[in-house]
Structures are given as C-alpha cells and as structure tokens.
Amino acid sequence: MQPDVVLSRVEKSFAGDAVVRGVDLAIRRGEFFSLLGPSGCGKTTTLRMIAGLEAPTGGSISIRGVDMAGVPIERRPTNLVFQKLALFPHLDVFDNIAFGLKLRKTPAPEIRRRVAEMLDIVRLSGFETRSVASLSGGQQQRVAIARAVVNEPAVLLLDEPLGALDLKLQTHLQEELRQIQRALEMTFVYVTHNQAEAMAMSDRIGVMNAGRLEQVGAPADLYLRPATRFVASFIGQTNLIDGRIDAIEDGKLRIEAGGLRFVADAHAGATVGAPATVSLRPEQIRLTKARDDGSDALVIADATFMGASVNYRLQGRGLTLLAQATGEAAPLPVGARVDATWLPDAAVTVAADGAGTAK
Amino acid sequence: MTAAGESRIGVALLRAGLLCVLVFMAAPIVIVVVNSFNASPFNIWPPTGLTTSWYAKALASPQFQRGMVNSVIAGVLSTALVLVLGTPAAYALARFHFRGASAVRAILMGPLVVPRVAIGFALFVLFIASRSGLYGSMTGIVLGHAVLMLPFVTTVLAANLGEIDPALEEAARDLGASPVGAFLRVVLPQMRSGLIIAGLFAFITSFDEVETTIFLTKPAVNTLPIEMYLYLDQYQDPTIAALSALLIGVSFLLLGVGLAATGRGSLRLLLGGRAS
Amino acid sequence: MSASTNTKPLLLLAPSALVVMAPFVASLVILAAYSVDYGPNGVGPDLTIWRNFLSDGYSWSVIATSLRLAASVTLITLLVAYPTACAILRIRNPLLSAIAYVILFSPLLMSVVVRSYGWLLLLADRGFVNSLLAASPFGLGPYRLIYNETGVVIALVHILLPFAVLPIIGALLQIPPIYREAAADLGAGPAAIVWKVTFPLSLPGVIVAAEIVFALAVSAFVTPSVLGGGRVLVLSRLVYENIGNVQWGLAAVQALILLAIAVGALLILERFNRSTFAKRAG
C-alpha cells in the first residue's frame, strides 16, 4: 500500500543552524508512528514541516502522493494537536470543536451531528457549552484531540500533547489515544521525548538525534536490535562496551573486550581486528558467585533494591557493567566477587551515532 | 508585598504621605465642582451663595455647544483611524523580527518625545505649504490627533498581542483559516481589552488636546478644550467651572464603562504599555 | 510565525507610515527649512534667524525659565511619586486600593484646561488655600501663588504625577519579593532593604518616569499660560505668540530648540539608564 506521508532528504535550518538533516521517512497508512528523541533533536520541527507551519530548506514532503511544497497550512490534509493545546479561550467546547467544520462551510445539522459524535468518542458529551478554561487538564486534552480529529484529516499530527499531565493521567490518555486511533484507522504521527510513551502506543518509532533519523522500527526491534549507540542507550538501559573483532565465523562476529567475550551477528564491512561496540542489556546478564580462585572476577560496587528487581553496578577488568537481576534469588552483597554470563546471542553490535541504517 | 522587615513608623509615614497625595490629587477637581455652584462671579472663597445659573450659561453658549460637537466628531474619527492603523502596526512589531524593526519603533515613538507645540506648529506649516486645505479643517485635526496617539495605541496593542499565544493562530490556520481569517476569528476577539483601553485613551487624548490642535484649528472647527482655553484667557467666572464639572461627570462615566468592560486586565496592560 | 522576509511586517506598517508617520516626518523637515529661511518666499538657506535668536539675552532667559521649570517639576514629581507608588502597592484592602488608584489616576481622564483652572481657583489671592492660611491660628498670608512660577510648578506636578507613578509601580511590581526576603534573611533592616535592594532594582522605572515627566513639562503650554497669566514665559508660549505675529522662521527656531531640549534630556537619561544597568551586570 502507498505510504501516507513521505519525507525525502528533508532539511531545515534556522539562520544557518541545521535543525533537521536529510531525513528520509515513509509513514504507512493507518499506523501509529512516533518520532522519538531528546529535546532539540528536530522532531517537533519535522512535525511542523509536515503540518506546513515551517517550510523545509531542502528536500520534499508529500502526503498521499501529493507534493506539499507551496501548499499552505490551511489546505493540507493534516491537523495538529498542539503541545500547549492552543484551545481558543473565547469559544466554548462546541465552538472549539466546530471551528474547522464551520470554516469548511459544513451545513449546521451536520456540524452538530459530527461534534456530538466526537464528544461521545472523547467521552465529553454534555460539555458543549462549557468554557474551555473551566475544564481539567485531561478534559482540555480531549477537546484538543476532538477539535483536530473531527475534520477527518488524512494524517493527525500530535506534538507531545500529554507532556503537561501527571503520570497517571498520561497513562490513561495513552490508552485512550490508542483506542481512538484504532477505531478511526487514521494515521497518527506522534512526537515525544518519552521513550516509554512511544513504546506503549506506537506501531513503529523513528528515533531522532541531532537532526538525524537514527533508526526506524517496531518498538521491540529498536529495543532488541538497536542500530546505533544512541538508540541503544536512549531506549532502555544498556551497557556499551568498546572492543575489537577477534574472528568472523559462520556470519557471526567474535568480539573481545576487557577479557569478556561476545558473539554478535556480522554486519557488512566487518574485518578482523577492527574496533566494534557491543550493546548488552543489564537484564541479559546472569550473576553467579565467583569461584575462589577467580582473580579477575567482577566485584559488586553498588546494589540498588528496586522491588521487582535488583540493580547492580559491577567493576573489574577495566570495565563498569550494569546488571539487573529479577526473580527469587537473594540479593548479593556489595563487595561480593561474581562471575557474569549471558546467552550467546544477547549482545548486538551498534554503529557510531548518525551512521544509522534508517531509510 | 511580603512584610520582610518593615518598621512601623516607616509604614505609618508612608500611609500619611499617601493620604496627602490623594488629597492633593483630588483637590482641584473637587474645587471645580464646588465652585460651579458659587454665586460669586470672581471665584471668591468661601462661596458667597449657591446657584445653578452657571450651568445654564455654559449649556446655552453657542461656542461650547459647537465645541462639544466638534470634539466628539474629532475624538470618534481620530480614535477609529488610529485603531485601524495601529492594529496592523502593533501586529508587525509584536509578531515579526525583521531588519529595521528598532528604527521603525523609534519613528513610531517619535511623537511621544517631540513637544506637542512643535508637532502642532510643524503640521500647521505642512498643511499650509502643501496647499492641501487641511489647515482649519476637521480632517486636519483628526490627522493631527492620530499623529499624537499612534505611539500610545501601538504600544498598548503590541503589549496586548504579546500576551496572546501565537500557537492560537497556528491552530486556526491548521483548522483551515486563511492568515486574515485566523486573525479575525482568533486574535481580534482576544484583543478586546487592549482595544478598549487604547481606544478610550485615544479618545480622551483627542478630547483633551490643546497644544497641537490650537495650531490647526479655525473657529468653525474649534474643539471644546480650545474654546475653554480661549474663554479662560478672557473671563474667569464659574461658567467654565460648570462646564468642567459636566466634563468630570462624563469622564467618570467613561472610566466606569472602561473598567466594567475590561476588568482587572486594564491596569496590567497600561503598566505593560508604559513600562516597555 | 517568524517570517524570513521583510515584506509582511512592512506591509502591515505601511498604512500607519503613509497616513500618520509621513506627515509627521515631513512636517519636521519643513520646520527645519523654515528655520533657515528656506522656502517659496525665503531667501535662505542662511542662519540669520538662528543667529539673531541665540545672540538675544531675552531668548536665553526664556530658555532658562523653561529648563528651570521642567527640572524642578521633574524633581518634585519624582520625590512625591516614588513613596506614593510604594504606599499604594502596600494597601491590602482591595476596596481602599481601588479608591486610591481611581483618585490617583482619574485626573488623567480630565482636560488639562479643567485641571489648570482648578488650581487657579485653589491658589487665587482670595482662593481656597489663602483663605485656609488666613483662618489658621497664625493668620498667614495672603501669598501670591498664581501668575508666577510657583503656581505653574504646583499645577504641573499635579498633572504629571500619574505619569510618574505608573512606570514606578510597574518597576516595583517586577521585583520578586524573594529578593527582599533574602536581604532580610541576610540581616538587612527595613531601611537597608529599601536602599540596597528595592530602590536600585526599580531605578529603570524611575528613569522612564523622569523621561516622560521632563518631556511633558518642558513642552507644557496650557498650564504655564493659565497659571502664569502671561507672566511666566516659556518656549512653547513664544512659539504660539510668534505664529500669531507671522514670525514663522523665529517660531520654527524656537520649536526646534524645544525639540532639541526634549531629545537631549531623553538621551542623557537613557545614557544614565544604560550605565546603571552596565554597573549591575559588571
């Protein structure tokens, strides 16, 4: 199926400062797509360029096969849910939601029907004549979503709309948003800096850093097979270990670092003796008490009890490793000497930042 | 104002001082109202008797009647003109960063610095030299008042616009409004208090103006303050007090309307407008 | 919404520029032309009018009167305005506070002619103030309070006080209370807090107040005319009289000198403002 939104080689710079650098991206019809990255990574600028609030300084954006160059905001098949909501303070809930429909000269009975339908979806029926200032944060949030969705845009753009809410409400609205998106089968492009939020809601995530798209993939892909150091460390916790390729056998790399050995899938251009970085998730590491003679065993420098798990900081062999132990095993004491083991395919090699394989 | 270290004597002195200042501010206005009933034609204190005849005289005066009409016309027209011109100018200053913005701001603020007598005389010479027929015409007076009021109106409206989130316009555009449509539907309704304050002050400025107007006017288009000034030059009987008392009444009426229409936002806007 | 091009803001500014600012700028240029006797009927450009005016002792005495009047009005107004602003911000009762604001600022709504006339009534030889003084146990007066500079100064302070209080209140409101609390916590007494914290931080507001008051005082016309009764001669009055006498070149010179004084005072105060800011930053 033809993708809904296609970005090719999109660039944006403000007064010579490059904010978005050569982003290529295809967002599929009906998917919940998140742009994830730290603040200042260019994700909001990318979203604003899709909406038409900013013009790219290079590259092109097309929506449903139509090039958007020169198409003003008001004629794009997109609607935006703003970060600070931007509800119109002088209009009540009904008039806020009906704003777009009225501009399109929709007949009054149809406006009433569609707004009522929308209010039902966001569970705000009966709030028509309330002023937006009298609503709670979560209710204002729903009005902002309804105001955009009621216009039935091809693509709904959301700019960190849940950022200002408390954690419990955030989680609740995440579920609601996901349900609305599934029910309407609408393409959502969601910008956030919160990796847990992106993981919870998205079909696919594009991870951005310093204006570049580092990797695009399903949440599990990003977690299990991060392409770059940045993606590995931004999504979840990880150990990044710099080592050297010892051998290449049967499409597998054997990597040695500080006396520890790793096996990872080979990537193109890997040569014996070349430096390589591996990512190893803390929960993949299993700890056992070291044998008495283990002169180069690891030492537990720090242990933090987290309830369902215990986080350990290990030192030795010139390395610091994080490990996470779950289950019934009794916590190991600080200062204990331990051996660390992991399954052969637990580690992955990651590329330097910006060298992502995202297309 | 938290009471982080205050001496009692200091506070008491401050309060007494404020009371004196308030008496000082109210005194000339109170005396005008009281004196409008003074039977003595020579403004002698204490009043020699009470009368309302000065009101009758003031209201019957053809000069004052004509002046009143001219003042209302000049006030309404110049206020309308300056709001229509000032709103886009304020929008440009509040929403865009552009080369030469500070120069534009300086020129816009010019009439605040230049003495009104100099502006009046300069406009008089321009009106005569350009053979435009503006000298001694209502159009000329309206134009002159607009020159004086534009800086204030632009400052207040720009401060007002600065408080309105630009994202609201983006939201309106995103929902299908054209740039002008977004301004009219979303920004303008929220400029209400700014427009009322700027308009009210523009009207009052125009209604009070002597220093510039006196150079631009001919008897047929004399405004009320001009007529009062010319009257005071010759007579000092309480006719002028009666007229003044009527104007004071109207001022308080306008103040009440303005406060009721804008609420608490008015002082903040004034402070913002003045201080910037 | 930051446009990279200049066209949009310039388009928005164009109407004001055409209708209001162009005549303003043009009239100043014409004023300058008249002052050098350059025009349809003039012979200039030459500086005869300037030379004659500036070599006349009488002109200098009028300039001196204008400056003295404006300076004393500015000083007195600021001395009254600062404690007034402090006091009015301290009122906690909302009704009393509203009453104080109305009494302080409502005179702005009233014509300068009305207010000057009010002072004429108060200060007249047989007016309210003199009758009060005579009725006092000391049986003072009567004093001559009108048709001299005293009356003009009193009335101008009254007229300009609201303009001075407004920016000072604005500046005081911008000082976070936490600074005063911190100073008190560090052991500063009430006087030290005012002198070392509040006053220096509110100085920009005081300077704005001084700029506004001086500019309005030096160019005041109605009040010096009404309360000076023709005996207090200031530049703005001379401009008016010379136009009546069809001495336009002379009036232009006087108007430009008035303008120069107003702009000069503004530049000096702005410089002062910047140097206090620089000191604080450094």
Image (cartoon, rainbow, N blue to C red):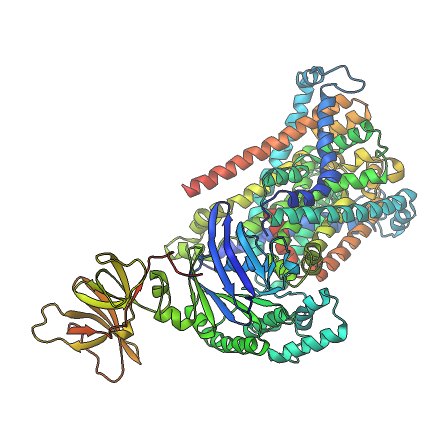
> Which residue ends up furthest to the front in the rendered image?
A250
Examine the rendering and report whether any part of residue C232 can be seen: no
Work out which residue is located at the far bottom of the displayed protein and give it. Answer: A328
What is the total number of numbered labels drawn onto the structure image? 0
Q: Judge whether C166 appears above or below A312 on screen.
A: above
In the displayed structure image, the side of residue A136 where residue A233 appears, left or right: left
C6 or B18: nearer the eye? C6
Q: Quadrant of residue A106?
A: bottom right
Q: Is residue A260 visible?
A: yes
Q: Which residue of the protein is positioned furthest toward the left in this rendering? A: A293
- Please state the horizontal and vertical placement of residue B272, each as a whole percent of the image: 60, 51
- Residue C48 in percent (x, y) is at 71, 15
Q: Is residue A38 left or right of residue C93?
A: left
Q: Quadrant of residue B143?
A: top right
- Taking the spot 28% from the left edge, 59% from the top edge, the residue there is A270
Residue A198 location (% of width, % of height): 45, 70
Left or right of C279 in this view: C35: right
Vertical side of B276 occupied by A337: above or below: below
Q: Residue at x 73, y 56 (%)?
A: B255
x, y percentage for residue A32?
A: 51, 71
Query: What residue sits 74% from the left and 19% below the top?
Result: C38
Front one among A201 and A31:
A31
Looking at the picture, tell me which residue is in the foreground, C65 or B39. C65
Left or right position of A93 against C197? right
Q: Residue at x 16, y 73 (%)?
A: A339
